[in-house]
Amino acid sequence: MIRRRALLATVASAVGAGCVAPVGRDAEVSPAPPPESEPNETASPPDRGSEERPTETHSHTEAPDCDEGLNVSAERFDPVEQLPLPLEGERLALVERAVGDGTTTVESYNHRPHVPSGAFVELEGRYYRLAATTTDETAVTALVLNVEWKKGQSPPEDATTVQFEALPQTDQQALDAVVFGTGSERREELPTRGLSVRESPVPYPDGLENSRFAAASDVLWVHWRDRWFRAWSDGRSTKERFTHEVAASAVAPDRDAFRALAREQYLLPAERFSDAERDILRAASADQYRECLPASEPLTSLRETLTDDARLPPPFEYSWLVGLDGDRYRVETLEWVV
């Protein structure tokens, strides 16, 4: 199995923050782990050694037989269609407020703002750039909650049971957050095989005085959506609540103006690259280009040409917009290790 380490990470910024970050879900409902091809945010070490190795660009489209190497990928990219941050749900409502008022604030239990700072958005045909900052951090009361569900389970005769609708609103919100997740991690469907959440600190900003979960001395069985959930607490805790400020600045009144902006600010024209570098980019656009380390002279030169100051904004902040043979490509480089 190959474990890959990024030359520059390609992970989009986390967006959409919620009220709780449940942990301990089973495989069915847990956020999927990043694919093995997805890099982390570790900068690659410098090339080891300087000896030259003969290479043929067209021969680097299959996995090389070595323990570590570099990949280059190039995918066709339309800045007008693909560069703006997708908007829906909470993120859309947040951007609408920021655009309407110039700036807005939002609270969440995620230290990252709901939208990545520097991202572009499109709203009603106009284009804006976002600036997001964290302005406050406060510790609020939380309940360490455990929730279990197994298909077909039902409470024993001596169990303490309650209908979901009979719970205080704070407990309803807490159970909903644990079962479905929140923000960008929220799911619309219930699990089909099982659910197991352990020691998840769920925020109760107004306190625990009315909480049935906090008052229960044993497991509380909750009937909800034709299922019986087992819920119990492991005591009180705290959870950090963050206040984020999001501002929106108009940058382009229409598609043509935004296309011109992207071209002027981010496009690296083909003339910027040497013939050998363009050969690598062409190979990458046809099928991911791969080399063993130490990198060849053309690939080393390409990495130097793809400078940090030319990178795209979020959510593509670890890639570049390159012009090649009349098309536009989003180029990424990735270091991998067996």
Image: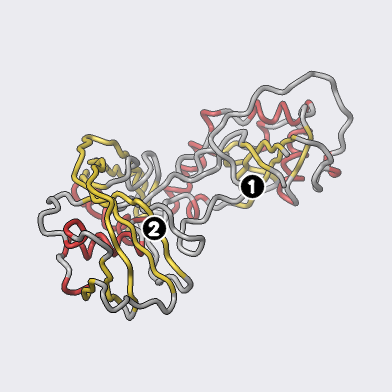
Q: Residues within 10 Å of mark 1 (few under 14, many from 20)?
A: some
Q: CA distance from mark 1 to mark 2?
A: 28 Å
Q: Position of residue 276 (x, y in %)?
A: 78, 33
User: Does 253 sit above or below residue 273?
Assistant: below
Residue linked to disc 2:
197
Task: Kindly indicate the quadrant of the structure image that contains residue 168.
Answer: bottom left
- In the rendered structure, the answer to whether residue 175 lies left or right of residue 187 reads left
Q: Is residue 19 visible?
A: no
User: Does 290 sit above or below residue 151?
Assistant: above
- In the rendered structure, the answer to whether residue 249 lies left or right of residue 308 reads left
Give the foreground label among 1 and 2.
2
The residue type indicated by label 2 comes to Val
Mark carried by residue 37: 1
What is the number of callouts on the image? 2
Q: Position of residue 266 (x, y in %)?
A: 52, 38
Along the line of sight, the residue nearer the viewer: 11 or 204: 204
Q: Position of residue 163 (x, y in %)?
A: 21, 76
Label 2 SS: strand
Mark carried by residue 264: none
Task: Kindly indicate the quadrant of the structure image that contains residue 338.
Answer: top right
Which residue sits at x=71%, y=49%? Answer: 285
Callout 1–callout 2 Cβ contact below 8 Å: no
